[in-house]
Amino acid sequence: MVRLDGVSRRFGATLAVEGVSLALAQGAFLTILGPSGCGKTTLLRMIAGFIAPSAGEIVIHGQPVAALPPWRRRIGMVFQKLALFPHLTAFDNVAYPLRMRAFPRAEIAARVERYLALVRLEGLAARRPHELSGGQQQRVAIARALVFEPDLLLLDEPLAALDRKLREDMQLEFRRIQQELGVTTINVTHDQREALVMSDSVLVMNGGRVQQEAPPVETYARPANRFVAGFLGLTNFLRGELIGVGDGRACVRVGEVELAGRHADPGLRPGAAVELAVRAERVRLVGQGDASDARFEARVAEVVFEGDRFVYEVRVAALGGATLRLFDLDPLGHARHEPGAMVTIGWLERDAMVFSV
């Protein structure tokens, strides 16, 4: 449905997007994820037609679109600033793209009613944007983007301004609507949860380049490099020296301790400076009978209660005083360890990853 071949965009001396290639199937949901300034919005705007690529080709529905202005690309778009017309009702906002395309009046009414029902706004058609909640305004914007049945739906951080609870609800709502309609969708966000919850595939960008494209589970569980591992989730990194590799396993010396993990970088050679990475949720407070391949005594430096978990920051003398963070996901079932307390922490070798520095 969408194909990009070596797409780049330069602004003066700055290369904002460099050599991005991807292929997106009909009905798929892709999220472009990355920090501010990584090039994700520039990439989306090139697909929409608001910016021309400096190099490369964009093909939508089998047609190169370099010569097509945005209004001829059959693309629906939902922006962070929703751009609803404040003087128009929800009905008229949704009807606007149909009227601009000269749809018959009877068909306009039927379509608008159907799409307002799809986004669960029955009975609110006569309200203006200021009479709707933030989530309801989002739904109007979604209906307006979809009502003319575009080939492609583009989402430019449309949930960023919502509070956390509403944002999480709308993530599920977006996914429901997308799956119900089967519309091919590209979403841009810096919200990790949003990318993992909503998407069939996640494309992680940094510095204008693609770092990894994979399904959400693979992106999280098998990050392609150190950047992806650090950007997704809360990850502990231990600097060390690679002392051996083989059979997908890497051994690392951290201080005077030898640790092992998955060999995540095929270019690593013994003697190289590396980092061993372990996600915070894979580091555990361990008891005497608990399984762990790496086990250390640690002193609690800080503990934070977040409702569904305790977040501990601990210091490990055996690892050169390294500071690690870990989660206790059963805060009501376990006693709280206060700062200064000694605890035993550990993790399994399969949960550690080794990356080049």
Image: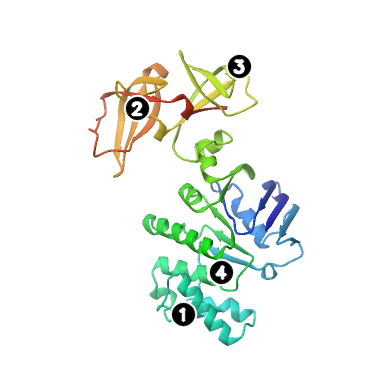
- Write the residue at 42% across / 21% down: 293
Please tell me whether residue 62 is drawn above or below residue 298 in the rendered image.
below
Cα distance in 3D space between marks 3 and 2? 29 Å
User: Which-is-in-front pick, marks 3 and 2?
Assistant: 3
- The residue indicated by pointer 4 is 145
Cα distance in 3D space between marks 4 and 1? 16 Å
Q: Amino acid at mark 1?
A: Thr
- The residue indicated by pointer 2 is 314
User: Which-is-in-front pick, marks 4 and 1?
Assistant: 4
Classed neighbour count for the residue bearing mark 4: other residues with Cα under 10 Å, few (<14), some (14–19), many (≥20): many
Cα distance in 3D space between marks 4 and 3? 54 Å
Classed neighbour count for the residue bearing mark 2: other residues with Cα under 10 Å, few (<14), some (14–19), many (≥20): many
Cα distance in 3D space between marks 2 and 1? 55 Å
Q: Quadrant of residue 306?
A: top left
- The residue indicated by pointer 3 is 270
The percent position of residue 305, horizontal first and vertical second, equals 28, 40
Tag 1 and tag 3, C-beta contact below 8 Å? no
Q: Name the quadrant of the C terminus.
A: top right
Q: Amino acid at mark 4?
A: Ala
Tag 3 and tag 2, C-beta contact below 8 Å? no
User: Which-is-in-front pick, marks 1 and 3?
Assistant: 3
Classed neighbour count for the residue bearing mark 1: other residues with Cα under 10 Å, few (<14), some (14–19), many (≥20): many
Q: Could you tell which of marks 4 and 1 lies nearer the N-terminus?
A: 1
Q: Residue furthest top?
A: 256
Q: Amino acid at mark 3?
A: Pro
Classed neighbour count for the residue bearing mark 3: other residues with Cα under 10 Å, few (<14), some (14–19), many (≥20): some
